[in-house]
Amino acid sequence: MRAALLMDPALVPFVFGDAERERLSEILEIDTADAATSLAGIPDPSGVELLIAGWGAKISPGDLDAFPKLRAIVHWSGGNGGLDGPASGRGIRISTARVANAIPVAEFTLAMITLAAKDAFWASRRYSAEQRFIDREAELPRTGLYGTTVGIVGASTIGTLVIEKLQRSDVRVLLYDPYATPETAARLGAELVPDLGALASRCDILSIHAPEIPSTIGMVSAAVLAALPDGATVINTARGALVDQEALVAELRRGRLRAVLDVTEPDVLEPGHPLYTLPNAFLTPHLAGSTGNELRRLGEVALAEIERFVAGAPFAHPMPVLP
């Protein structure tokens, strides 16, 4: 079976180790040393039946016309909207490692929620700046995860996993998602709140996990941010465009809110942007998703899906149909 790699060539050894590349060569007709960043860069596309796709691929409309035998796409990443829509319309089967990539994001988010609740970022900066004894109970009276209210925006794959992890902690979880039902929320152990502003008004921590689509851009608006109680923390591991960033900066400058941001708009911010230096903002360089050795998990999931396809079995992780 002819197959081709559609991804950044530099990522191949990070995603597929020696054993995985050897196995791919055993079950497929593929050159694992020759990854293309576009469909147009794949040699002899007319015979390709399987694409193994991931980050770094650039897709143009009509590119699939050159692949008459293509039967499946296995993403070791979350998927590619520019490729998946046209492919599914042609009856091409699609698998995604979205669930596997959700694991490190949920782990990262839970860590940020815990550290934000413990005032770890802000206490560390204060401790380093003042270099003195910090009377925790007198100066940090609200510190601790116990009894806090965490608002989750979006019962996505990641949002759902974060909620499940939070159930091991003594916290109250609120959920905003226009597609979720009270039954879904109850099954997760969360309270469904149909209005985002109303949810924000009850939160100590607001964690964002919605996809970036036209209806979600700017959804965490100035009004939503204003509804958050004084001292609340906004955590964003989704996409920067979901937050009114100017309004967030204004709230941070007033010292009313805190923010833990793994993503911004744009991503990366221009040099000198205030989010880099505001004392109540903690930035990370878009590292919540799979990085380093976590990429091997994505490769292992993709390889298992490829073996299922070669054996004629259905995918364990087919691309979901979005509402």
Image (cartoon, rainbow, N blue to C red):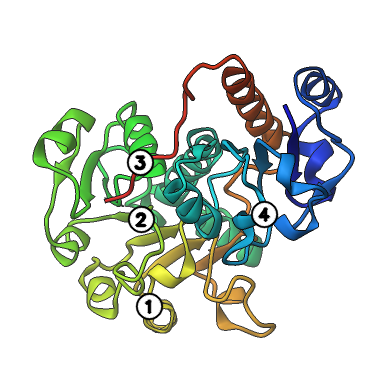
The residue that disc 4 covers is 66
Nearer to us: label 3 or label 1: 1
Q: CA distance from mark 2 to mark 1?
A: 14 Å
Which amino acid type corresponds to the residue marked 3 in the rendered image?
Leu
Nearer to us: label 4 or label 1: 4
- In the rendered image, residue 41, in percent from the top left (x then y), is placed at 80, 57
Asked if the residue under mark 1 is in contact with the one under mark 4, i.e. CB atoms within 8 Å, the reply is no
- Residue extending furthest toward the right: 33
Query: Mark 2: few, some, or many residues within 10 Å (few <14, many ≥20)?
Result: many
Which amino acid type corresponds to the residue marked 1 in the rendered image?
Asp
Query: Mark 1: few, some, or many residues within 10 Å (few <14, many ≥20)?
Result: some
- In the rendered image, residue 167, in percent from the top left (x then y), is placed at 30, 29
- Give the mark nearest the N terminus, 3 or 1: 3
On screen, 28 above or below 44? above
Q: Secondary structure at mark 3?
A: loop
- Position of residue 273 in the picture relative to residue 34 (left or right): left
Query: Mark 3: few, some, or many residues within 10 Å (few <14, many ≥20)?
Result: many
The residue that disc 3 covers is 145
- Give the mark nearest the N terminus, 4 or 1: 4
The residue that disc 1 covers is 244
Q: Residue at the spot x=80%, y=28% of the render?
A: 29
Asked if the residue under mark 3 is in contact with the one under mark 2, i.e. CB atoms within 8 Å, the reply is no
Q: Quick check: can you spot residue 109?
A: yes
Q: CA distance from mark 2 to mark 4?
A: 35 Å
Nearer to us: label 2 or label 3: 2
Which amino acid type corresponds to the residue marked 2 in the rendered image?
Ala
- Position of residue 13 in the picture relative to residue 156 (left or right): right
Q: CA distance from mark 4 to mark 1?
A: 42 Å
